[in-house]
Image (cartoon, coloured by chain):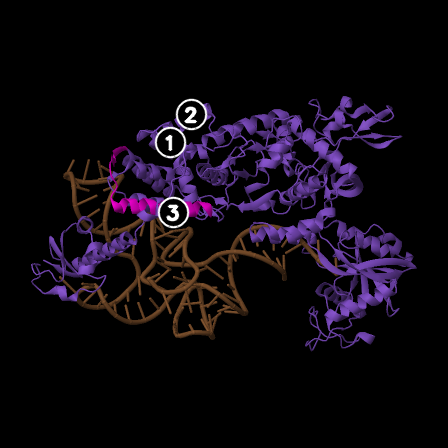
RNA sequence: GUGGGUGUGCCGGAGUGGUCAAACGGGAUGGACUCAAAAUCCAUUGGCUUAGUGCCUACCUAGGUUCGAACCCUAGCACCCACACCA
């Protein structure tokens, strides 16, 4: 297939001449365009990836041609659990497995014609990369941003290993369907992301990101303002958090989380048996079911003393209270909280209305605000005022304080897995946790480990048994590795100059950062994008960076579904592979088609018929370029070309690639067989971001030296744009459809058509065009033409913009 | 449940106050070319009606604002995505 030869030829030429290699150039304005780097899986790229990367490539090519110094790099998020599992399955080593997958990805990406600067390739599994993960970790540790704490993990007693959340299916291990996953308390490393919660939250608004991503981040951080109130239980103070201190007088019971660490201290002897039974029961319920399961609880036997009324209210243990939000205990106001209401109804606990509502009967909780009742001196106050007054009263009596709560938690980075960055700590019996000295970095992953039970790193004694850096005594190396989100939190810095010995090249980072356009899926809204923002801020405060936010503009591409609208998946067997499509239609057809379907941020379905039409269209363009006469452009052609430049440029800038492709079709549809060299060049340039291989070929066909990829984007000549030509098209279209309409009605065989137009309109009618399109002989007269042929005196019917018609 | 998004003709999808029966593409139909087909090109593609006009019904549903609404507001419905008992 000819298109394939063309693609291959230009891919080779680009690579040989390294035309996409980028250097810092202070004279040029920079533009850093980045796609979220992929996790290299054995399956390789599918059409969805091709679409994703095409979005960035089109933009990069456009920006490059527009005179920007463009940084457009690619790399691989190469460490991680899937590779480890896949390698175990394939009885190979994660390293070999990953390396192979990467090579395959690179080949596929090159085949797509993506204009990456491959000299900046970054792989996170490279010790020279993850060395800096370790370095950053140590810096965080120094600054108090990394710490170790006991935390619950999913543990499979069969695998003797920790499981990630996604490896837990219905409370069972993904590999051992009969094994319940246990929650085990292990000492884990955390990163203190919450230190930056306020800044992460406040700065979201300033970002040029899609609104839904911004709101997802805000929700994720989930800051709520409320009051901490101290209740006394068995002589001990138990603080709770509430956003509704105005309902304090309506408290009729308390609920402590069934997972609360100190639940036991609340359980009385009489109730112990019942509580144990309850705990056992809810343990067998999987985490997923927990969400839909009915609210249940059990009386602990203890009572809490209400801080203001001194009333005694019962304390329950409940399955619906989160142990790790707030203080793990809540005050319950059944009249004004639906959950409390449900619970109270089930266990027949008293309800007390303290906000006046229009509810006649209590069938559900009234959760709105309103006037206080049954609240002693606060009666009659509005909720808003009461919140403030009650909080102040509590504060005065040291019974509580104003406070805020976050959903956002510190980031647990410990993974008890092999294929990740080793955490640079040595555990010494006498010195404790000793950071590995910087000069000893990187701590490389030992190649020789046994996979199977537990953490593979523990099977290599050379790795684990090391002297303590402090006392030189026998010590054990930390075998936890880092979450791979650690790797992806700063890779964008490395691209700025990946080949330096340092963590990054300061000058290059100053020049390129922040990323101007970041392109990737919405699934990263809360994890990756928050961690990356956190890193930027933390590194800034370590004096390493001088900007606040890593990604100025974020773009989420839509999903590419399979034909019929289903998700592409291996199990459904509907995955469309770029290489298969390229072979049939050429890669440029695939690129053009993918972006022509809908706005890039919208989901789209693959459609074999659709790409066929694109293929035909590009063939037509190819034919045109080969056969067009280079000479002089008609004013109409100049108008069309310049109009197209103007519109397509605007469309690309605003990521409306789909409308840009339509304008290319319209432009091409109306091009005349003679055109000036300059206009022809412009037309080809307009194709270049979308169909780079064909554009290079066209460029050569018309006698130019390579590379069009490095040529400059055409400039609009506004003086050539003339509304007259738009009017001409409009008038001509109308005339054509009118003639056809009449012809259909009279159904006579006729050859001759006469049009009578108002004198001022004459210039807008193109007889030749009308004649060609109606396949009739067309003559146009001015209505005041004395010599006109008008046997039925039709000409008097002519109106402005509407010709009279006589058909012979 | 909460937050966000979407709803347009046979289909995909433009369009965000008049120039809209609504770009562009697909599909379908008719025509040109051809011995024929493919390719290519032209036209048609809500209804009624008339020599090209006019009218009616239309952009999820129901109301509203406006001289005027696919477009703005209100309520509802449907679908999609994310979070999910966050006190």
In whole angstroms, how far apart are the C-alphas of marks 3 and 1? 22 Å
**Which chain is rendered purple in the image?**
A
Give the labeled residue for mark 2. Answer: A13
Q: Are marks 1 and 2 in contact (CB under 8 Å)?
A: yes
Residue marked by disc 3: A646
Q: Which residues are magenta?
A: A626-654
* Same chain assignment for discs 3 and 2: yes
Within 10 Å of disc 2 (Cα), the crowding (few <14, some 14-19, many 20+) is: some
Q: Which residue is mark 1?
A: A696
Badge 3 crowding class, 10 Å Cα cut-off, few under 14, some 14 to 19, many 20 or more, is: some
Whether A635 is among the magenta residues is: yes
- The vertical placement of A349 against A538, above or below, is below
Q: Using the image as rendered, state which of residue A792 and residue A276 is in the foreground.
A: A792
A243 left or right, relative to A119: right
Q: Pointers 3 and 1 in contact (CB under 8 A)?
A: no
Mark 3 falls on what kind of element?
Answer: helix
- Location of the N terminus of chain A by quadrant is top left
Report in which chain the residue with disc 2 lies: A
Visual hue assigned to chain B:
brown
Local SS, label 1: helix
Q: Is the residue marked by circle 1 packed among few (<14), some (14-19), or many (20+) residues within 10 Å?
A: many
The mark closer to the camera, 3 or 2, is: 3
Query: What secondary structure is the magenta-colored segment mainly?
Result: helix
For residue A355, which quarter of the picture? bottom right
Q: Which quarter of the figure has residue A461?
A: top right
């Amino acid at each position: 297939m000819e298109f394939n030869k063309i693609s291959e030829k230009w891919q080779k030429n680009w690579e040989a001449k390294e035309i996409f290699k980028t250097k810092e150039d202070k004279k040029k304005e920079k533009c850093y365009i980045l796609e979220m780097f992929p996790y290299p899986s054995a399956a390789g790229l599918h059409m969805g990836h091709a679409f994703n990367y095409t979005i960035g490539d089109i933009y990069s090519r456009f920006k490059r041609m527009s005179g920007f110094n463009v940084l457009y790099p690619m790399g691989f998020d190469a460490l991680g659990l899937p590779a480890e599992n896949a390698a175990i399955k394939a009885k190979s080593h994660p390293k070999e497995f990953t390396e192979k997958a990467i090579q395959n990805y690179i080949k596929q990406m090159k085949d797509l014609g993506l204009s990456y600067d491959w000299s900046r390739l970054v792989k996170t599994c490279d010790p020279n990369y993850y060395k800096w993960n370790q370095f950053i970790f140590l810096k965080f540790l120094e600054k108090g941003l990394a710490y170790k704490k006991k935390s619950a993990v999913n543990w499979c007693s069969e695998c003797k290993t920790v499981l990630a959340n996604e490896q837990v299916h219905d409370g069972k291990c993904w590999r051992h369907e009969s094994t319940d996953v246990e929650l085990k308390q292990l000492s884990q490393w955390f990163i203190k992301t919450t230190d930056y919660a306020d800044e992460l939250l406040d700065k979201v608004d300033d970002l040029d990101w899609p609104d839904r991503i911004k709101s997802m981040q805000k929700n994720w951080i989930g800051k709520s303002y409320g009051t901490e109130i101290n209740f006394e239980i068995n002589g001990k103070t138990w603080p709770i958090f509430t956003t509704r201190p105005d309902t304090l007088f309506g408290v009729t019971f308390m609920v402590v989380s069934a997972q609360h660490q100190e639940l036991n201290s609340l359980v009385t002897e009489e109730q112990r048996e019942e509580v144990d039974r309850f705990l056992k029961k809810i343990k067998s319920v999987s985490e997923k079911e927990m969400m839909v399961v009915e609210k249940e609880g059990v009386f602990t036997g203890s009572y809490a003393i209400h801080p203001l009324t001194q009333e005694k209210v019962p304390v329950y243990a409940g399955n619906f209270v989160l142990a790790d939000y707030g203080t793990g205990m809540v005050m319950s106001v059944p009249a004004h909280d639906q959950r409390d209401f449900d619970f109270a109804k089930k266990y027949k606990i008293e309800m007390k209305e303290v906000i006046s509502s229009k509810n006649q009967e209590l069938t559900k909780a009234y959760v709105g605000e309103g006037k206080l009742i049954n609240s002693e001196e606060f009666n009659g106050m509005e909720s808003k005022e009461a919140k403030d007054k009650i909080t102040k009263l509590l504060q005065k009596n040291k019974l509580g304080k104003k406070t805020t709560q976050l959903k956002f938690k510190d980031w647990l980075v410990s993974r008890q897995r092999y294929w990740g960055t080793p955490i640079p700590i040595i555990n010494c019996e006498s010195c404790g946790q000793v950071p590995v000295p910087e000069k000893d970095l990187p701590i490389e992953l030992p190649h020789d480990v046994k996979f199977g039970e537990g953490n593979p790193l523990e099977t290599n004694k050379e790795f684990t048994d090391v002297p303590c850096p402090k006392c030189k005594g026998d010590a054990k190396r930390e075998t936890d590795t880092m979450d791979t989100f650690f790797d992806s939190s700063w890779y964008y810095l490395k691209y700025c100059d990946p080949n330096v010995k340092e963590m990054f090249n300061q000058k290059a980072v100053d020049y390129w950062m922040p990323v101007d356009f970041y392109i990737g899926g919405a699934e990263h809204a809360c994890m990756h994008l928050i961690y990356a923002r956190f890193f930027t801020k933390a590194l800034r405060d370590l004096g390493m960076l001088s900007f606040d936010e890593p990604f100025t503009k974020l773009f989420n591409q839509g999903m590419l579904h399979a034909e019929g609208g289903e998700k592409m998946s291996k199990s459904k067997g509907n995955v469309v592979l770029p290489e298969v499509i390229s072979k049939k239609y050429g890669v440029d057809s695939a690129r053009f088609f993918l972006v022509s379907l809908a706005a890039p941020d919208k989901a789209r379905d693959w459609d074999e018929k659709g790409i066929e039409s694109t293929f035909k269209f590009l063939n037509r363009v190819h034919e045109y370029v080969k056969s067009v006469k280079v000479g002089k452009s008609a004013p109409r052609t100049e108008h069309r070309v310049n109009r197209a430049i103007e519109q397509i440029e605007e469309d690309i800038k605003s990521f409306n690639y789909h409308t840009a492709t339509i304008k290319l079709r319209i432009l091409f549809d109306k091009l005349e067989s003679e055109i000036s060299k300059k206009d022809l060049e412009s037309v080809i340039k307009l194709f270049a971001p979308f169909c780079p291989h064909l554009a290079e070929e066209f460029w050569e066909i018309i006698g130019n030296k390579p590379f069009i990829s490095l040529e400059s984007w055409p400039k609009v000549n506004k003086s050539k744009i003339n509304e007259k030509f738009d009017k001409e098209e409009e008038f001509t279209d109308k005339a054509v459809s009118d003639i056809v309409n009449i012809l259909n009605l009279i159904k006579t065989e006729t050859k001759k058509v006469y049009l009578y137009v108002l004198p001022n309109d004459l210039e807008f009618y193109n007889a030749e065009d009308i004649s060609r399109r109606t396949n009739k002989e067309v003559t146009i007269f001015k209505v005041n033409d004395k010599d006109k042929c008008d046997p039925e005196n039709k000409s008097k019917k002519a109106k402005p913009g509407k010709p009279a018609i006589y058909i012979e």
